[in-house]
Image (spheres, grey):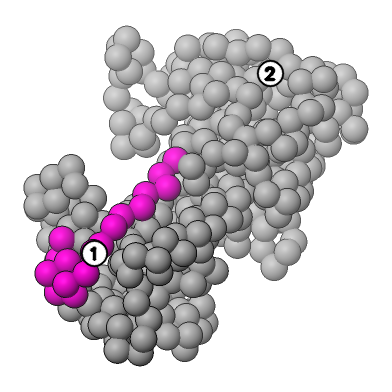
Amino acid sequence: MKENLRIGILTSGGDCQALNAAMRGVALALYEKNKKTQIIGIENGFEGLINGNCRNLSKDDFENILSIGGTILGSSRMPFKHINEPDENGTEKIPAMIKNYKKMGLDCLVVLGGNGSQKTANLLSMKGLNIVSLPKTIDNDVFETDMTFGYASALEVASKTIENIKTTAASHSRIFIVEIMGHKTGHLTLNAGIAGGADVILIPEIPFDTIAVAEKINQNETEGKNYSIIAIAEGAKTKQDALLSKKEYKEKMGNVSISFHLASQLRMLCNKDVRISIPGHIQRGGSPCTQDKILASRLGAAAAECILQEKFGTMVAIVNDKIVPVELNKVAGFTKYVDVESDAIKQAKALGISFG
């Protein structure tokens, strides 16, 4: 590896906690090994790479960002399904990224992103660019890694929301539906529901029966519990809806979330006041928790090691508490779903939690 390294870094997709901590990990580990390293911050994700929007960063830029949420570089979404289509200015995305990578004189591009970003990173790697990526998402659904950074912090927020809603639910004898982020997977909802003490957990991997949910609520009433808490992932579906095509489901639901559909049915089935709480983007905001700061820092340091050892076309992952490089082509295009036969599901059921 040459002495004057030029390393580009970008954050792509939805923001989450510990993005800054991860970038700091990459930067400090590189500076530690090579004081002449130049780090080029690419602004607003892949959009910035397309348009050539970047700025030189120094060690000072990374000194005090460990506990700061969001991303100092900004981010943007670029759905992979549209990656081969021109942007609004008619620019071909991939050729523009390759051109600006070379124009910036980069020796490697570090990508911090979730599933879609990993696919774009893999495509750029296949086109001959030196890529190292890090897994970030509050959904914890990136393949080949036990944990993504951002997940633990979002879990703290989501579980605390469920826990805090209990007192008002009990005070007013209400059913509360807490809608947690997660369109395709239910890792966040599952563990937030367990940690927050939910009575019912509804996730995309397990289509539910509304009648079964109502029966759990009525059981609570019979046993003297005057309230019930339902943790539901935004991508959860009933057993009937799970049989619909994506188009049919969208037409049926319109712009109304699953929580509101469920609430209207439970009001009739249980004859109780049903309220909905949606923490939304609060789950992605704020400072990272301690666990995320540790994980992001370790992943960042490992990414720097991959760069120095020229292990390109890789994503750094945590597997059995060890940080390991995995090939991007084994990550891109795959999703880590909740295993419905997992111990976590079995133990949640043993606690009396219903999955509908």
Left or right: where 349 falls relative to 23 = left
Left or right: where does residue 244 sit relative to residue 120?
left
Q: Position of residue 217 (x, y in %)?
A: 29, 78
For the residue pair 292 and 164, the one nearer the viewer reads as 164
Of marks 2 and 1, the one in the foreground: 1
Q: In the image, residue 9 lies at what x, y percent?
A: 64, 27
Of mark 2 and mark 1, the one earlier in the sequence is: 2
Q: Residue at x 29, y 57 (%)?
A: 275
Mark 2 lies on a secondary structure that is: strand
Q: Which residue is mark 1?
A: 273
Residue 172 higher or lower than 107, as above or below: below
Percent of width and height locating residue 152: 60, 55
Residue 216, above or below 77: below
Please rate how many residues cluster around mark 2, counting C-alpha atoms within 10 Å: few if below 14, some from 14 to 19, many from 20.
many
Determine whether, in the image, residue 29 is placed left or right of residue 339: right
Quadrant of the image occupied by residue 80:
top left
Magenta residue check for 355: no
Q: Is the N terminus in the top left, top right, bottom left or bottom right quadrant? A: top right
Q: Residue at x 65, y 12 (%)?
A: 55
For mark 1, give the secondary structure.
loop
Number of callouts:
2
- Name the spot of residue 154 as percent of width and height, x first: 54, 51
Q: Is residue 267 magenta?
A: yes
Q: Which mark is residue 156?
A: none
Above or below, 183 against 25 in this view is below
Q: Residue furthest front?
A: 171
Residue 163 seen? yes
Residue type, mark 1 in image: Asp
How far is the residue under mark 2 from the one under mark 1?
A: 54 Å
Q: 32 or 122: which is nearer to us?
A: 32
Read off the magenta span. Answer: 264-281
Q: Which residue is mark 2?
A: 40
